[in-house]
Image (spheres, rainbow, N blue to C red):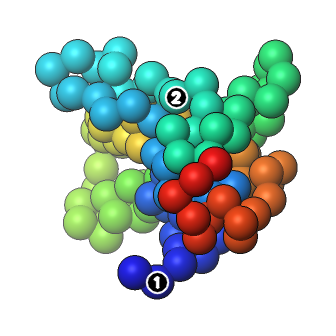
């Protein structure tokens, strides 16, 4: 298997140190709260996923950027599909977009934020041992 690169490890929500262990516990749609459960450390290399208290505060800014891109995409799509839309329709669509994309943007923003501060270690990525 080829080694994951930095971008693919972020997008697949993998540990930035070994690029193998999952960041999040497997969640179930029937229990929405479980979609936000994160491992405390990497199951593969034991890298801590919470280096300090409040570490993910900065991930809110990344999430803001992701949500802004989603909002603009939804607005432009609505503009092309239905040019004479009402403000109520636009707000309704944005609420649906927010609710459906919340687990995605939460997980991706945390993955990006962690990858900015934790560097890849080839010794943990190539072996099965921590």
Q: Quadrant of the N terminus?
A: bottom left
Mark 2, secondary structure of its residue: loop
In the picture, measured across the screen, residue 75 lies left or right of residue 84, that is right
Instruction: List x then y, in percent, for residue 20.
Output: 50, 58
Q: Which residue is mark 1?
A: 2
How many residues crowd around disc 1 within 10 Å: few (fewer than 14), some, or many (20 or more)?
A: few
Q: Residue furthest front?
A: 129
Q: In this view of the protein, which residue sits in the foreground, 26 or 65?
A: 26
Mark before the other along the chain sequence, 1 or 2: 1
Place residue 41 in its image quadrant.
Answer: top right
Measuring 59% from the left and 25% from the top, which residue is drawn there? 40
In the picture, measured across the screen, residue 84 lies left or right of residue 114, that is left
Instruction: List x then y, in percent, for residue 103.
Output: 40, 35
Instruction: List x then y, in percent, for residue 112.
Output: 66, 52
Q: In this view of the protein, which residue sits in the foreground, 57 or 86?
A: 57
Q: Is residue 42 above or below residue 57?
A: below
Q: Which residue is mark 2?
A: 39
How many residues crowd around disc 2 within 10 Å: few (fewer than 14), some, or many (20 or more)?
A: some
Q: CA distance from mark 1 to mark 2?
A: 25 Å
Mark 1, secondary structure of its residue: loop
Q: In this view of the protein, which residue sits in the foreground, 83 or 66?
A: 66
Measuring 52% from the left and 28% from the top, which residue is drawn there? 39
Q: Is residue 112 visible?
A: no
Measuring 51% from the left and 28% from the top, which residue is drawn there? 38
Place residue 75 in its image quadrant.
Answer: bottom left
Instruction: List x then y, in percent, for residue 21.
Output: 50, 49
Cβ atoms at labels 1 and 2 below 8 Å apart: no
Q: Is residue 81 visible?
A: yes
């Amino acid at each position: 298997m080829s080694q994951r690169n930095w971008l693919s490890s972020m997008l697949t929500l993998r540990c930035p140190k070994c690029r193998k262990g999952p960041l999040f516990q497997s969640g179930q749609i029937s229990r929405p709260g479980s979609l936000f459960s994160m491992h405390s450390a990497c199951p593969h290399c034991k890298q801590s996923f919470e280096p300090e208290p409040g570490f993910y505060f900065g991930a809110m800014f990344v999430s803001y950027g992701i949500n802004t891109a989603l909002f603009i995409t939804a607005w432009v799509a609505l503009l092309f599909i239905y040019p004479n839309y009402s403000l109520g329709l636009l707000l309704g669509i944005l609420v649906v977009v927010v609710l459906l994309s919340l687990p995605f943007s939460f997980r991706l923003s945390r993955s990006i934020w962690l990858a900015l501060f934790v560097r890849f270690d080839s010794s943990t990525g190539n072996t099965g041992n921590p």
